[in-house]
Image (cartoon, grey):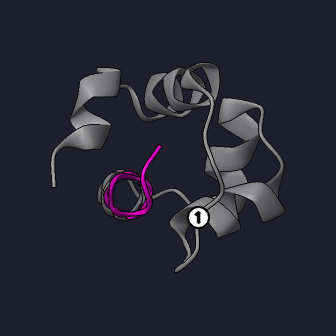
Amino acid sequence: MKNLLKIIVGKRIKELRKKVRLTQEELAEKAGVDYKYLQRIEGKTPPNLKLETIEDIAHALKVNPTKLFNP
């Protein structure tokens, strides 16, 4: 995943997480990902993401995974 796309996805996750009033810890638990990993995803230099992780986070946010790619 290119850097810009990773940043867009990270920002979108953060935006949607705040919209549903979840903390990073709560979202990480619901999505089954490590809290520190979620912090990195939402940060300035996000790691590469597997499609499965994107799907897990989208499911936890109750949105279609494609919503995470819309800036």
Residue at image location 25% in from the left, 26% down from the top: 66
| Residue 8 % position (x, y) | 31, 59
Image coordinates of residue 41 in percent, x first then y, are: 59, 60
Give the image quarter of residue 51. Answer: top right
Residue 63 seen in the figure = no
Given the image, on which type of amino acid does mark 1 rest?
Answer: Pro
Residue 12 covered by magenta stretch? no
Q: Eyeballing the image, is 18 above or below 52?
A: below
- Residue at image point 66% right, 32% down: 31
Q: Name the side, left or right, on which 30 lies relative to 68.
A: right
Pinpoint residue 58: horizontal percent, then vertical percent.
44, 29
Q: Going by the picture, which residue comes out furthest to the front?
A: 2
Residue at horizontal 51 percent and vertical 21 percent from the top:
55
Residue 58, placed above or below residue 43: above
Residue 37 visible within the image:
yes
- Which quadrant: the C terminus? bottom left
Q: Nearer the viewer, residue 69 or 21?
A: 69
**Residue 5 lies in the magenta-colored region:** yes
What secondary structure prevails in the magenta region?
A: helix
Near mark 1 (Cα within 10 A), the count class, few <14, some 14-19 or many ≥20, is: many
Q: Which residue is mark 1?
A: 46
> Horizontal placement of 9 versus 69: left or right?
right
Q: Front-most of 24 and 8?
A: 8
Farthest-out residue, left: 71
* Range of magenta residues: 1-10
Q: Residue at x 67, y 57 (%)?
A: 38
Measured along the vertical axis of the image, is residue 30 above or below residue 19? above
| Circle 1 SS class | loop
Q: Quadrant of residue 62?
A: top left
